[in-house]
Amino acid sequence: MANTPKSAPWWGNVLLLGGVILLALLPLLVVRDAEFEGVDAQAPEVVKELQPNYEPWVQPLFEPASGEIESLLFAVQAGLGAGVMGYVLGRYHGRTDQRRE
């Protein structure tokens, strides 16, 4: 059997998890009255400021009926993407492990 990498100590994972939670909560605590919206929502306003006569030359193929449905579709898309990435990374990791044996 080839050399196997040592696993990280458990406190390393706890520190990483704590860092992730801190990064998620810090903006909410530091910037209290900010509006958290995506770039997609801000872009039309910036374009109107820069080019007041601009008219879009492409329309969306599908517009969801409400913001909640749009958020749902975005979450489903993100979940599917994460699943595909996890599957691909798992396959490569499994292949690497098989080559080592």
Image (cartoon, rainbow, N blue to C red):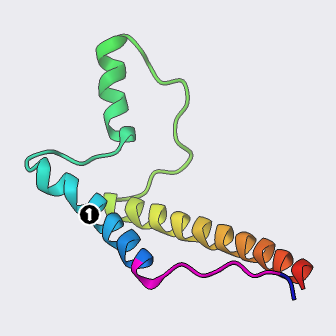
Q: Nearer the viewer, residue 35 or 6?
A: 6
Above or below, 48 against 31 in this view is above
Instruction: Give the side of residue 17 with respect to residue 26, left or right.
Output: right
77 horizontally vs 26: left or right: right
Residue 16 percent location from the top left of the image: 40, 69
Is any part of residue 52 visible from this angle? no
Residue 49: give x, y in percent of width and height. Answer: 29, 15
**Horizontal and vertical percent for residue 44?**
35, 29
Position of residue 30 in the picture relative to residue 57 (left or right): left
The quadrant of the picture occupied by the C terminus is bottom right
Tell me the quadrant of the picture where the N terminus can be found: bottom right
Q: Secondary structure at mark 1?
A: helix
Rendered residue at 26%/63% (across/down): 22
Quarter where residue 91 is shown: bottom right
Q: Which residues are magenta?
A: 3-11
* Residue corresponding to mark 1: 22
